[in-house]
Amino acid sequence: MKADHTLDCVGLYCPMPIVKTSQKMKELKSGEVLEVVADDKGIKQDMPAWAQTTGNEFLGMEESGGEIKVYVKKK
């Protein structure tokens, strides 16, 4: 999936990937896509819930080699 920005959250654990995502999304323009790379499995449940709560769009997730990439589009 094509992202406009990437946020590296590898090595961070709940709730830091969501905190960092929230901070980064404030810098993005409406419609831009953020790729968040993490290795904390909690992000698989946390990110869709966060996106729904904040009105942003959860676009999907990819997993490979212990890394989880999630994609969120700014509202």
Image (cartoon, grey):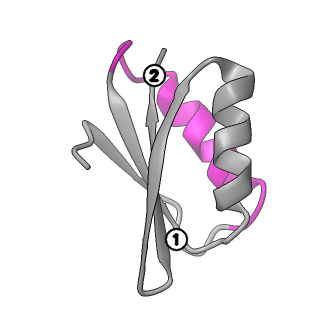
Question: What's the amino acid at mark 1?
Answer: Val
Q: Is residue 46 above or below residue 37?
A: above
- Residue 6 locus on image (x, y percent): 34, 49
Q: Which mark is residue 74?
A: 2
Location of residue 56 with respect to 51 vertically, above or below: above
Q: Are marks 1 and 2 in contact (CB under 8 Å)?
A: no
**Residue shown at 63%/31% (left/top)?**
51
Identity of the residue drawn at 38% across and 12% down: 30
Which mark is first along the chain, 2 or 1? 1
Q: Which residues are magenta?
A: 13-31
Viewed as shown, does residue 7 lie left or right of 57? left
Vertical position of residue 68 compared to residue 28: above or below: below
Asked whether residue 21 is drawn in magenta, I would say: yes
Say which residue appears at 65% left-offset and 59% top-offset: 44
Q: Which numbered tag is attached to residue 30? A: none
Q: Is residue 72 magenta?
A: no
Residue 23 location (% of width, % of height): 58, 33
Neighbour tally class for label 1: few under 14, some 14-19, many 20 plus, Cα within 10 Å: some
Disc 2 crowd, CA 10 A, few/some/many (<14, 14-19, 20+): many
Observer-nearest of 7 and 67? 67
Which amino acid is tagged 2? Lys
Residue of label 1: 10
